[in-house]
Amino acid sequence: MDATTSDRIMVTVDGRTAEVPAGTSILNAARQMGISIPTLCNYRGLSCYGACRVCLVEIERGQGRQLVASCSYPAENGLVVHTETEKVKDSRQTILELLLAQAPESAELAEFAANLGVESTPFKPVTNGKCILCGLCARVCNEMMGRGAINLFGRGIAKQVRTAWSEQSDQCQACGACAFVCPTGAVDLKTITARRLRPHNTGYDQFLTARPCIDLAHPQASPRVPYIDRDNCVHFKSDECGLCFKVCGAGAIDYEQTVETLDLQVGSVVLTPGFEAFDATRRGEFGFGFAPNVLTNVQFERMLSAAGPTRGHLSRPSDGKAPKRLAFIQCVGSRDAGCDNDYCSSVCCMAATKEAILAMEHEPGLEVTVFFLDLRAFGKDFDRYYERAQKLGVRYVRSFISRTYEMPGSKNLRLVHMNPEMKPVEAEFDMIVLSLGLEPSASLQKQAERLGVVLNRWGFAKTSELMPLDTSRPGVYVGGAFQEPKDIPDTVMQASAAAARAMSLLAAARGTLVRTKSYPPQRDVTDEPARIGVFVCHCGSNIASVVDVEAVVKKAREFPNVILSEHNVYTCASNNQDLMKEKIIANKLNRVVVASCTPRTHEPIFRDTLRDAGLNPYLFEMANIRDQCSWVHSASPEQATAKAVDLVRMAVGRAGCLMPLQEETVPVSNGVLVIGGGIAGMTAALALADQGFPVHLVEKSDQLGGTTREIHHTLDHGDVQGFLAQTIDRLRASRNITIYPNSSVSKVDGNVGSFTSKVVTDGELREIKHGVVVVATGATELKPQSYGYGKSKHVITQLELADRLGKGEFDLPAKATVVMIQCVEQRSEERPYCSRICCTTAVRNALLLKERFPKARIMVLYRDMRTYGYREAAYREAREKGVLFVRYEADHPPTLEVGARLRLKVREPALGKDLQVEPDMVVLAAPMAPRADRKEISELLKVPLNADGFFLEAHTKLRPVDFASEGLFICGTAHSPKFITESISQANAVAARAATILSHKQMPVSGQIAYVDPDKCVSCMTCVHLCAYMAPRIGTDNKAEVQGVVCMGCGSCASECPAKAIMLRHYVDTQILAAVNSLLYAEPVEKQVKNPYPEQVGVAPPKWHKSGV
Amino acid sequence: MSKYEPLILAFCCHYCAYAAADLAGSMRLQYPNNVRVLKLPCTGKLEVNFILAAFERGVDGVFVAGCLEGGCHYLEGNLRARRRVERAKEILSEIGLEPERVDMFNLSSAQGPRFAEIVNEMTARLTSLGPSPFRPARGAEEPVREMTEQAEASLSGENHDCCQS
C-alpha cells in the first residue's frame, strides 16, 4: 500500500481504504469515506481542541492497538483504524458517563449519549450546569467572529466559560453563533450580551418566523439554491465569520458575487413587476405593528399554508393559542383617498372570503366576521362562492371600521361597528386580519422613468381601456397587477396577452435564435434480453450521509438482469453523464436505473443522456432515494438503506419491462378558425394575423362588431365606435384574414393541429383546414321581464341608454329625475351571477347624463357597488357630482308602478323606511347573458358550459383562455361578462396561447399515450364517454381508437376499459405490476414479461422496430 | 423476532401526491420509513388489481394519494381512483382482510407536511392492525419482518387467487 505521491496518503478505516491528503485527521478521513465518528467538540471549520474525547478510535500500532482521539490525530500513510471495537465502545461509554456527570442538566447531551447507548451515569454530578467545557463557543467567537467576547477561564476544576469579569460583554455582537454551535445547550446569550436579541424574521414568511441568514428562499424555490441574507449575515456586516465557506464541501459559497449588469439585445419588453401590499403601519389605528394579534392578509395567507410558519395551524402570535373569534377588516389602504389610494384593489373581497372559509376548515368552531363596505364578488362564479361562505357561517357585516383597541392582558382586540340598524355595537375578537390594498412598488417609480414608461396617478403603468397592454412607449407592454390591481385569472390572461403583443411585433424574427440538438440513431433493443445498468448517487452527502450507498450498489448487483451497478458522488454532474454514456455503450446496456433524487426534476436530464448514448429515452427508470428516503429518514440510516434497496429493486423490476416508445410528430396546419366577429373575435383574429397565421373569421350576422356597436364611450373617455371602425378596417385590410359574414360553422372534425371544418354561408358550404379554434361568440344584454320594461318607453336598459346617449338621440326635461336600478334579474335565484359591468356602466352613464343635463337628479339603487380597480375613482366622482346612491337589500327590491307617471318605492335599509320617487326615466341594469347559440357551439366543439351558460375554461385560475381539449380557446363575453378592455386582453391572450401550437410546423406526440387493441375492443364507448380530452373515438372499423395528439397520457381510459383493450404506454399493467411484485423480493427472471405490448395494428402504429435507424 | 414494522405501498400521482412527498423531503420532515412510493401519471391509472396484487405479494397496507378533489391535473382521475379504492376495500372485506388496510387520500403538491401526516397515520393504523396474513417472511438477509401463525397457515393453505376478480 504505497502512497502515490508524498501529499496523498492511504488510510484504512473499518476495512475501507481511501486516499486522503497528508495531514488529514482520522476524523476527517473517515468523514470523507462516509463513516461517521461521534464527536461533541469538533466542528468543521473551527480549530481542533480535542476536549471531549468522545471521538476515540483504535489504531493499529505495531503488534498492538492504541486508543487515540480521532479529531486531533493526523492520519499517516498505511494507518489502520477501527471505530467500533469493544474497547472503543467501552471507553466512549465511560467518557460519556463522566460528561453526563459534568453536565447533568443538558437534555441535548443526554439525547446524544442515549443515541450511543448511554442512558445514565454512575457518577455523582460534579456541577449542576450544562457546560462540558468543550470550548466550541469560545472558538467560534474568537476564530470566526474575531470578537473574543467569551473565553475559557481558570484551570482544572475551576475552569469555566465566561465573559471577562463575568459581565455582559461589549464585544459581543449578539450573532448567536456560540449558542448555535454549543452541543449541550449551555449558552445563555443574555448573560453574554446586553444587546437586544431579536430573531432575523424574514420576508418570505411575512416576518412571522426567524430564518437562518443562509437559506432557501422557500421550500419550492427554483432554482433550489440557498442565498445569503446580506442584511443580517455577519460576514457582510463585519467581514468576519465565513463559517459557511469552510463548511460547504462543494465549495459553493462565493462572497464575491455582485450584481451583474447584462446588455441584452431585445425587440420588445414586457413589464410584469407585480404589486406590493399596502404598508399596514400607515393605517396605525388598526394596531398593526404593535398589537401582535393584528395580522395582514398576506401574513394570514402564510399562516394558512401547510408549508408556512405554523404548518397551517391558526395561532395567535401573542400566545400561540388558536383564535376562536376572527375578524377581517376590508379596504385597508384601498378605496382610501386619505392615503392617496382611491382605487379598489379588486382582489381583497374574494381573498378574505377564501381565507375565511379556509380558516374555518383549519379551526372548526371558529367564528369569522368580515367587515366590508361593498362585497365585490364580480368575477366568474364569485357570487356563488360568496353565497357558499355565508352558508358555511361566515358573518358579513357592512360597516366601516375606524380603529381597534387592544385589551391589556388578553391581547384581544375590540372594535366598534354598525349593526344593520346603523347603531354602533362593540365587538371583541381574538385575532384581526387586515385586507391590505395592492400598491405599485416604490422602486418601480424610478425604473419606469428609466424605461420611459408613463405611470398613472397612482404609480401603476398608464394604459388606456382600448389599448390595455400597451404602455406609453411603443414595444413596451405590460401584464398583471402593474397595469391595474387584478386577480390570478386576469393576471394570467393579461400576461399571455402582453406576450401576444410582443409576438405580433417580432413575428418576422420568430425562430431565428433557436438551436436544435442532434442525437445519434437509436439502437433497436426490442428483441434483446434486458441488460440493466444501475447508477446510485451519493448526491454529495445528501444521500450518502444516511444511506449506505455501497451496500445498495452491492445489493443491486444481485437483482435480475442487472449487468452493472455503481455509484457516483453526483450522478447528474456532466462528467458523470459522459461516463454513464460510455458505460451504456461499452456494456451494451439497454435499460438504465438511476437511484438518486426525484424524477420530477432529473428524469429529463438522464433521458437525454440515454438519447446521447443511442438508447430510446423511455428505457429509463428512477428510484427516488433522496427526497423520499435519505432526507426523511435521516435518523435511521439502517432502515433508510433497506428502503433504498427496496426502491431500487422496484425500479429494476419495472425497468426490465420497459420498452422503447416512439415520439412521433404530426404536421400542424397554421390556420385559425375564429367563431364570432365581435370585439374579442376581431382582436384575436388581428393578433394572430399579425403573427402571420391565416385566419378564418366566421360571423353569423352581416356586420362585424357585435354588442360593441351599441357602446360609445369607455370610462376613460375612449371613443369605442372610432376604435371599432379602425379595427374593422384593419381586419378588412389584412391579407391573412378571410371574413365569412352571414355564416355559421356546421361541422368541426379532427384534433389539435389539424382540424377540418365546414362553414355555411347562405346555404353554400365551404371547407376550411385549420390548427386551432377560437370561440368568441360573445354575450348579449338580456331584455328584462320586470319593472314594466317594454310597457313604458320611460323604462329602458343601461345599454339602450348608452347607445342613445352616444348617438345623441336622448333627451330629458331639464330637472328630470332618473333612477337606475341595479342587479335587475341577476344575483337572483334564477341567475345567481353578477354581470360585472353594470355598476360601472351605471356610473359612466350617470356621469354622461350629469354632463349633458346638469340639473337632472340621478339616483342609483344598488346592492353592492362593484366599481373595482380604477372604476372606483369614477364612482367617487359621480358622488361628488351629486349622483345619489341608495342601497337596497335583496329581500326588499324596489317596486315600480307604471302608469301615467312612474312611481318608484324603495326601502332604504339604514333608515328602515321606504323612499318614494316619481322618476321621469328608469334605467335597468339588465343581466349580460350568453348567446342563444351557445349550446350548438358547445355540442359542435364538445366543450363544456357552466351552470350559467358561459363556456367553461380548462382551469379557472391557471388556464383561463384554454378549453380542456387541446387546440380550442375561448375569449370575450362568451367566457363570462366583462368589459371591452378585458375582452381585448383575453383575445390577445388567446392569440398567444394559440401561437404556441401554430408556430410549430410539426407537433410532437408523447410516447406515453393510450392505445386500443382493436381485437379486444367491444365498442362499448366507455372510453369515448369518460375521456375529458376526447382522445378516444370510434374509428372506421367501429372500434375505439385513441388520437395520439389529443391524448394527455393519464391512463384513466385504460383502467376503466371493461374489456381491458386499452393500455397506457409506459405504464402498462405488467410494468406497474413488475414494480409491485419487486417490492419485497426480486421477480425471478423467467417470470418477467419480456414485451408487454401486443402486436400493433390500427391507428398510427408506433415504430418501435428499427426506430430511427 | 424483531418488532413488527408494517410495509406499506403508496400509489402517488405525478403532479400532486408525488410532488408533495418530494416537498416533505426538501422540508426534511421525518416520517416512518414503512412506505414505498410507486408513481403513477394519475391515480386514474390505478386499478383494483394493483392493490390486490400488492396484498398478494405481502404488503400490509396500501394507500393511494391523488390531487385534491377538483384539482386533478387530468380533471377527474382522482375521483375514479376513489371509487376503485372503495371497490378494493369491499373485496378485502370479502376475503376477510380489514378494509382499513387500504385508503385514499387527496393532497396538493404544496402539502408536504400532509404527506408526512398521511404516512404517520397509515403506519400507526397498520401497526395496530398487525401484519397481513398474506405476508411471507422476507429473506434472511433482509430486515426481518415478523410472520404470524395465521399468515403461515394462510400461505400453506389453499391457493388464494383473489386477484383474478
Image (cartoon, coloured by chain):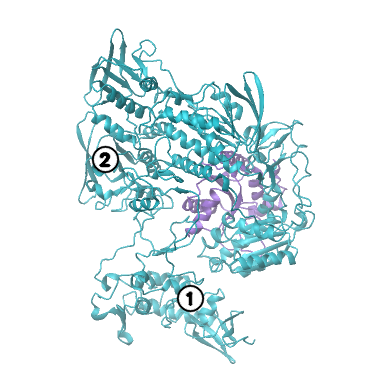
Chain colours: A cyan, B purple
Q: Secondary structure at mark 1?
A: loop
Q: Which residue is mark 2?
A: A336
Q: Earlier in the sequence, mark 1 or mark 2?
A: 1
Q: Residue at x 29, y 78 (%)?
A: A162
Q: Position of residue A1100 (x, y in %)?
A: 74, 41
Give a yes or no on whether discs 1 and 2 share a subunit. Answer: yes
The answer to whether A225 appears left or right of A891 in the picture is right
Assess whether mark 2 and mark 1 are in contact (beta carbons under 8 angstroms). Answer: no
Q: Camera-side residue: A827 or A304?
A: A827
Q: Position of residue A214 (x, y in %)?
A: 41, 65
Q: Quadrant of the N terminus of chain A?
A: bottom right
Q: Quadrant of the C terminus of chain A?
A: bottom right
Real-space Cα separation, disc 1 to disc 2, in angstroms: 62 Å
Q: Residue pushed farthest top?
A: A900
Residue A323 in sight in this render: yes
Q: Quadrant of residue A1060?
A: top right
Q: Position of residue A265 (x, y in %)?
A: 50, 55
Q: Amino acid at mark 2?
A: Asp
The numbered mark at residue A38 is 1
Q: Which of the two discs, 1 and 2, sits closer to the camera?
A: 2
Position of B138 relative to B64 (above/below)? below
The answer to whether B93 appears left or right of A581 in the picture is left
Q: Amino acid at mark 1?
A: Pro
Chain bearing mark 2: A
Total labels: the figure holds 2
Q: Position of residue A192 (x, y in %)?
A: 27, 73
Q: Residue at x 59, y 56 (%)?
A: A599
Q: Secondary structure at mark 2?
A: loop
Residue A650 in sight in this render: no
